[in-house]
Image: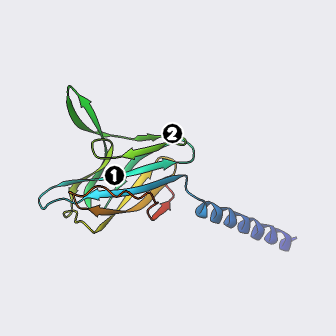
Amino acid sequence: MIVTNVGRAALGLLLAGLACAQAVGAEPSIHVVDAWARATPPGVENGAVYCKIQNQGAADRLVGARSSAARAVEIHASVARNGLTEMHRIDALPLDTGASVDLAPGGTHVMLVGLAAPLVAGEKIELTLVFATAGMMTVEVPVVDARAAPPAHEHEHEHEHHSP
């Protein structure tokens, strides 16, 4: 009887372990592609990150971000009012099922507030995006020359997916 209970407990732990391994190895439903940041001159305190976020799963929301490259990271949207474009911090960016959302200059973007150092072309910074359901995702963001056009390739950048 004791062996049977121990055997059942071991089998239960094994099955639970396999379920966790499948969840950890599961393909994420959120993909971040074409991430980039524009280089900043010395003395500039803020920068921005642009990318495309593709949601291939259930509806979700981008609710935050962080990076060691800046004191704070905020989600910003640009809104046109009375012929002027104003930038506003938003609490969350909705990502509908099947949506592809562009974070681009002149529109919605991730703002790096209080840069730790200028963003230098040719270097990379890490950015962790926080999603309400999908959890945290870290992407490597290449910094490009401010006079150059943004990267035109469409491949997914390396990223790590972490549970919330």
Amino acid at circle 2? Asp
Q: Position of residue 106 (x, y in %)?
A: 27, 42
Residue shown at 45%/56% (left/top)? 136
Specify the label residue 96 is tagged with: 2
Q: Is residue 25 visible?
A: yes
Task: In this rendered view, identify the residue nearer to me: 52 or 7.
Answer: 52
The correct choice, above or below, for 90 with respect to 112 in the image is above
Q: Position of residue 53 (x, y in %)?
A: 44, 49
The answer to whether 110 appears left or right of 145 in the picture is right
Residue beneath label 1, please? 50
Residue sitting farthest toward the right: 1
Residue sitting farthest toward the top: 82
The correct choice, above or below, for 16 with respect to 111 in the image is below
- Disc on the earlier residue, 1 or 2: 1
Q: Quadrant of residue 14?
A: bottom right
Q: Mark 1 Cα within 10 Å, few/some/many (few <14, many 20+)? A: many
Alpha-carbon distance for marks 1 and 2? 19 Å
Under circle 1, the secondary element is: strand
The answer to whether 93 appears left or right of 76 in the picture is right
Amino acid at circle 1? Tyr
Q: Position of residue 39 (x, y in %)?
A: 22, 60
Q: Quadrant of residue 144?
A: bottom left
The answer to whether 75 appears left or right of 41 in the picture is right
Q: Is residue 68 visible?
A: no
Quadrant assignment for the N terminus: bottom right
